[in-house]
Amino acid sequence: MKASRIAATVLAALGLTLTVAVHAETVLKIGYTSTRDSHYGAGADAFGEELARRTNGRFKVQHFPTAALGGEREMIEAVQLGTQDLVITSTGPVGNFVPDARIVDIPFLFRDYAHAHKVLDGAIGDELLKKFPGKGLVALAWMENGFRHITNSRRPVNVPEDVKGLKLRTMENKVHMEAFKAMGALPTPMSMTEVFTALQQGTVDGQENPIPVILSNKLYQVQKNVSLTGHVYSPALLLISPSVWGGLSEADRQAFVEAARAAVAANRKRVSEDEANGIATIRAAGVDVVEKVDHALFERAVAPAYVAYGKEFGAERIQQIQSVR
């Protein structure tokens, strides 16, 4: 009897241990500056759902939207250090960590969404992603914000001359700043977490962002004019901490990659939906929207900045991206 009771106790203990192992769960923190109900939130949701499905619930993604963990630069640093697991970030501050990535922020580099997707989902995009581990980061995928447009509280922007003298918040990105200097604007780099208040208080006259960002951050509430200049295609990135990535098995790494693909699909779908419906929302708030902008004029206005871009990235490299069909 004693032996059987001991055996039963051992089996029960083993059964309990096995049950705990099966249900063990690793919680990963993912941060982003937009709201949960945004194109970033849609991507993060899809990532978490697909990752849980592919790993039988062993990994759970915990959201920290609306810059709850800090601005983009701070979150990238935290992911680099391993104090944060994942971040969805615009490419704005990424060039401070991976300088080669700045090339995707050049104005009028991409003709349209199809062109941008073909470049970033192809060999050129993969080559850029491979630059990240050498800088203490792992990039899982290219996501997106969309094409950037100018908003301001002073006047409608119809032609490049209308931009002259405007104090515009830009991302902390010298590629963007050089373009606005070429147009005669006064670029003011600032974290996204400060933009709404800066616009509300008149610290800056305006800013530039894609429609999904203007919507999710409600920037149309503190701006009088939106002009659909589409001057820059704005990618985003899903970054994971090397400390997390390094501890994954090959099978789990593949699950993370597949989950990232699901995130990209959901994120781009939401961007498309926001662009289709967002102008009506912005107009309903009493904002003047200039839809028909002569993009060729704006392209010529930033042409002087291409001299600096050619020196930094190589004119042939820029041409290679522009030539993708």
Image (tube, grey):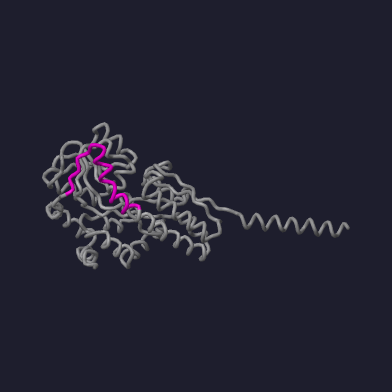
* Residue at 24% from the left image edge and 42% from the top image edge: 207
Quarter of the rendering occupied by the N terminus: bottom right
- Residue that appears at 63% across and 57% down: 21
Instruction: Indicate whether residue 274 is drawn in magenta.
Output: yes
Q: Is residue 287 above or below residue 13?
A: above
Specify whether 212 is left or right of 58: left
Q: Quadrant of residue 166?
A: top left
Specify whether residue 253 is painted magenta: no
Residue depicted at x 48% and y 62%: 255
* Residue 183: image location, x then y, percent: 14, 47
Q: Residue furthest top?
A: 201
**Foreground residue among 225 and 191:** 225
Q: Which residues are magenta?
A: 270-291
Q: Residue at x 24, y 41 (%)?
A: 283
Give left or right: position of 168 versus 13.
Answer: left
The answer to whether 140 appears left or right of 186 in the picture is right
Q: Is residue 126 left or right of residue 306?
A: right
Give the x, y percent position of residue 241.
Answer: 45, 54
Predominant secondary structure, magenta span:
helix
Residue 209 image offset from top left, x and y in percent = 27, 46
